[in-house]
Amino acid sequence: MTGYDPVILFGIVLALALNFFNGLADAAQGVATVVATRALSPAKAVFLTGVCNMAGPFIFTTAVAATIGTAIVHADALTPETIIVAMLASTTLVFCATKLGLPVSSSHALIGGLVGSSVAAFGLAAIIYPAWSVIGQIVVWGLLGAVLGAVAVGAIAAAFEGDVRLAIIIGAVSGTAFAIPILMVLGVLKITGLLVVILFIFISPVLGAVTAFLFDMLISHLFKNSRQNRMKRIFSPLQIVACLFQATSHGANDGMHAVGVITALLVAGGILTVFAVPTWVLLLSAIAIGLGTCFGGWKVVDRMAKGITKIRPYQGFCAGTAGSTTLALVTMQGIPVSSNHVISGAIVGVGATRGKNAVRWKVVQEMMTAWVVTIPLAALCAFVGYLLFATVSSALL
């Protein structure tokens, strides 16, 4: 990297720091279930997931990096200055949240930062907006999915003399959450940019929760006559495998943040003519997130491992498998979701199999609040940060 402009070098260092803090904060989603069930010690769990986080970007696609670098704001708005301000704002936000034990999304913090600094520099025209026709399709298909889900789950509840009203609500939410990603995979819906990121703030935890709930019910039925000791012997190793798969998927999604930003920075600085990820960028970003995971965000680990619900080894396996599968599928679609959102939803899903009182909903509510406010808060911080930067630059010049 000799001969690079100091501003570009500073931006690269910032991006790697963001990935480091990403691993620091999101260590929780990779190790929460195995720590909670004592399948692995915290130190071993964090080390192994750190290695898998490093491997993830090389195993899966780099589509998430392309979304970060090309589909959120227009290329003209991605200048070295707007990118650096966005990274400063998002890195500070993630660091502070990690210290407080709040599992905020580093991907959403970065996206909010890019939006805020770009709007401050170039106005609202900097954002890549979806076509109205796409929004209309989402509404139509979402409503159809809600109706089908409500009818199906409500009918099942009625047949088993359950709470039909609650079942209809759950079915409607689940139907919408599953309909949109399925149609995206089939190519019926083509949603990109900021809209898909906002949609999956709500969709991804529901996918994780419903998938984990159903998987848990299936495993419970298949092993209903097995003793707890036998269940532990069978599922403790499987839970570790699920945890490592989940960490690999996390590296391929969240690990692409620095990759996308650094590549966009190189394009903005004229070092690259097109958005094509260099191998050295992929390698450095993978090392940064792996090191961050190895250090571990222990407050977040404790909250996710123990704060949401108590889980057993087979439930840890169900949550890890459901979460990692969901994460892998959205990664292949190039959607930068929060790994914390997905695995938190999965943990809620396995906890809910023991009844609604088995989940500490106050903790879930606090986490959901943090998820919702992350993008606007990061955007506000970056917006103000860029205005301050512009004011100081003008005064000095």
Image (cartoon, helix red, strand yellow):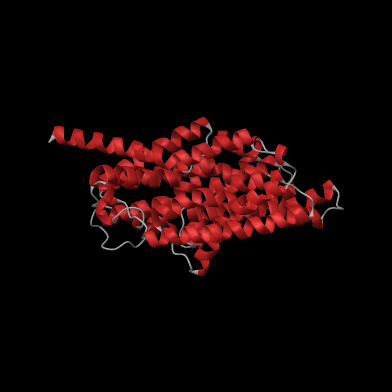
Q: Residue at x 36, y 53 (%)?
A: 72
Q: Residue furthest left?
A: 397
Q: How many marks?
A: 0
**Residue 9 image position (x, y, % from top left):** 29, 47
Q: Please indicate whether residue 249 sits to the left or right of residue 130 in the image.
A: right
**Residue 37 image position (x, y, % from top left):** 71, 42
Q: Residue at x 64, y 35 (%)?
A: 307
Q: Is residue 321 visible?
A: no
**Residue 304 image position (x, y, % from top left):** 61, 39
Q: Residue at x 68, y 47 (%)?
A: 165
Q: Please indicate whether residue 333 sits to the left or right of residue 40 in the image.
A: left
**Residue 150 image position (x, y, % from top left):** 64, 55
Image quadrant of residue 146?
bottom right
Q: Please indicate whether residue 273 sits to the left or right of residue 231 in the image.
A: left
Q: Decide which of 265, 392 is in the foreground and name it.
A: 392
Q: Decide which of 271, 329 is in the foreground and name it.
A: 329
Q: Residue at x 59, y 50 (%)?
A: 206
Q: Please indicate whether residue 330 sits to the left or right of residue 67 in the image.
A: right
Q: Residue furthest top?
A: 100
Quarter of the picture containing the C terminus is: top left
Image quadrant of residue 71?
bottom left
Q: Is residue 308 visible?
A: yes
Q: Decide which of 39, 341 is in the foreground and name it.
A: 341
